[in-house]
Amino acid sequence: MSNTIFKVGDTVYDEVYFPGDIGKVTANFKEVGDHSNSFPVWVKFSNGHCRYTEYGKYDLSSKHPTLSHTPYEVVYKGFSQKRGHTFKPFDRVLVTDLGWDEWKLGIFSHAVTYEDYTTKYFILGGTSWEYCIPYEGNEYLFSGENTHFKK
């Protein structure tokens, strides 16, 4: 058996793909000597499963791992995001789901807060998004990667 960072049974966190959720490592194929799998670490979260590299990366091309043994905060560069929405219908907004996706320009329609206190922001056309900020003052974010991780 080889030494691994994430062992079966470990409690783990992925604040990018599963924010606020606690996961359990259900399999690590490197522990049993299978070195052929690029994503040997399998994690079960309350709302899904995910596979990671042995170092906790969700994607081989990622600069940063998203899987951690401790909770962490995702910090967005260039603006302050407030909890809750203060938008009016037809406001111009930038929206994204995972924080490092390109920001998309939209016209705000409405927001819905669910029982688990998550909020989805809807733009005209009916699509919903996890993050929503004003377009005015954030025009430079209209494309590109705008996040880093703070442990």
Image: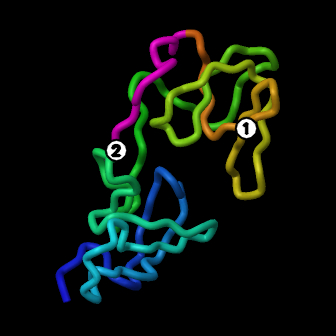
Q: Residues within 10 Å of mark 1 (few under 14, many from 20)?
A: many
Left or right: where does residue 76 sit relative to residue 85? left
What residue is shown with label 1? 128
Q: Residue at x 29, y 68 (%)?
A: 54
Q: What residue did someone put label 2 on?
A: 149
Q: Residue at x 77, y 51 (%)?
A: 114
Cα–Cα gap, marks 2 and 1 = 24 Å
In the rendered image, residue 48, in percent from the top left (x then y), is placed at 60, 67
Image coordinates for residue 145, horizontal then vertical, percent: 40, 30
Q: Indicate the quadrant containing the N terminus: top left, top right, bottom left or bottom right.
A: bottom left
Q: Position of residue 44 (x, y in %)?
A: 53, 74
- Residue 107 in view: yes
Q: Secondary structure at mark 1?
A: strand
Q: In percent of the image, x 44 and y 59: which residue is there?
A: 14
Q: Earlier in the sequence, mark 2 or mark 1?
A: 1
- Is there any visible trace of residue 151 in the rendered image? no
Describe the element under mark 2 as helix, strand or loop: strand
Give coordinates of residue 46: x percent, y percent: 61, 70
| Disc nearest the viewer among 2 and 1 | 1
Residue type, mark 2 in image? Phe
Residue 143 shown in magenta? yes
**Which segment is the magenta one?**
137-151
Residue 51 lies in what quarter of the image? bottom left
Q: Is residue 76 above or below residue 60?
A: above
Relative to 149, is 15 on the left or the right? right
Residue 45: in magenta span? no
Q: Is residue 108 left or right of residue 11?
A: right
- Label 1 is placed on what type of residue? Ser
Q: Is residue 103 above or below residue 121?
A: above
